[in-house]
Amino acid sequence: MQAKLLARASSHAKNVLHAPLGRALAALLAIVVLGCFFHKEGAFFTWQTHQGMLREVSVTGILACGMTVVILTSGIDLAVGSTLALSAVLFALLTMPRGFSPVSAIAIVLVAGAGLGAATGGVIARFRLQPFIATLAAMVFARGLAKYVAQGKKITPYFGGLSHPLPKIFDVLDERVFDRNVPVVTLVFLGVVVVTWFVLARLRIGRFIYAIGGNAEAARLAGVPVGLVTVFAYSYSGLLAAIAGICQAAQETHGDPETGLGFELDAIAMVVIGGTSLSGGRGGPLLTLLGALTIGYLQKILSINAFTTEARLMMTGAIIVGAALLQRRRA
């Protein structure tokens, strides 16, 4: 029975992208065409505009990949923005005042992010707590822990009244490669997309994730370890939030306990606009990549045309509602 369920989930995972992929590509194309009309005296046609968009969207895109895995299980993770902040603070603290090597600091931060996600997933799996409530609690906890660790301050090279050199790893992660055309953080984002695709499309646990999102009770009756898979999904989301936090700290050259506010909403927007179903079981990281580019181009077009932050937020919210309604209509 489990083999039959997994075969169905695997087939579904391979074929389910076709219709949403077309819609996601159409949405991205529509936004790009919009930019061609509202190009602000040719600003949209310069490589600097596209380069800036890629850099700006990459950190939230990394979060969105983790969010995709969670949403495929029919869950949600509201804690990713706070986990990002906690990770940024830890990374800055370990590499500057504490003097840890970059490898050790990165390892500790990744374990912390994955551990926080695993704890949240464990609460959801063990006590059948709604993901919204569990991750809301995790969001508040992680944000409070970030402020506690940072003593309510930004962790800079001058933290604690002493001067610490900015570690080289910060420059490496904020560098541009390929003749200074592509930000390193964008390559990290693309690498995360590929790894997430591999996990979901090629590994057994990926088929488990699709099966749980399709029908959790049927998956449980078929012998799928629903609890363990749920813990994995949230742990993976926490891990990617930690990676995003490291990149965020490098871009800002400090660890800010207030960073990442609202990033969880941006990540959800990218997933939804890409076409991954909020009810679970349908979608994937390639759709999220398209959703991230769509959001990125939309925000960049509004920015170069001098729309206010308020207008950008309202328009993004309206597009999210439209994408969700389209999903419901197509379901």
Image: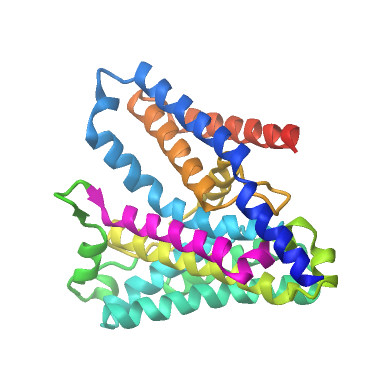
* Residue 236 visible: yes
Q: In which quadrant of the rendered view does residue 42 lie?
A: top left
Looking at the rendering, the stretch of residues picked out in magenta corresponds to: 182-209
Q: In which quadrant of the rendered view does residue 105 lie?
A: bottom left
Residue 256 rendering spot, x and y as whole percentages? 39, 62
Residue 104 rendering spot, x and y as whole percentages? 33, 83
Q: Is residue 32 above or below residue 103?
A: above
Please tell me whether the stretch drawn in magenta is mainly helix, strand or loop: helix
Choose between 1 and 306: the one closer to the eye. 1
Q: Is residue 46 above or below residue 11?
A: above
Residue at image position (67%, 46%) is 277
Choose between 7 and 276: the one closer to the eye. 7
Residue 238 rendering spot, x and y as whole percentages? 53, 68
Choose between 208 and 33: the one closer to the eye. 208
* Residue 73 visible: no
Figure quadrant of the N terminus: bottom right
Q: Is residue 150 above or below residue 185?
A: below
- Asked if the stretch drawn in magenta spans residue 310, the answer is no
Left or right: 215 in relation to 262: right
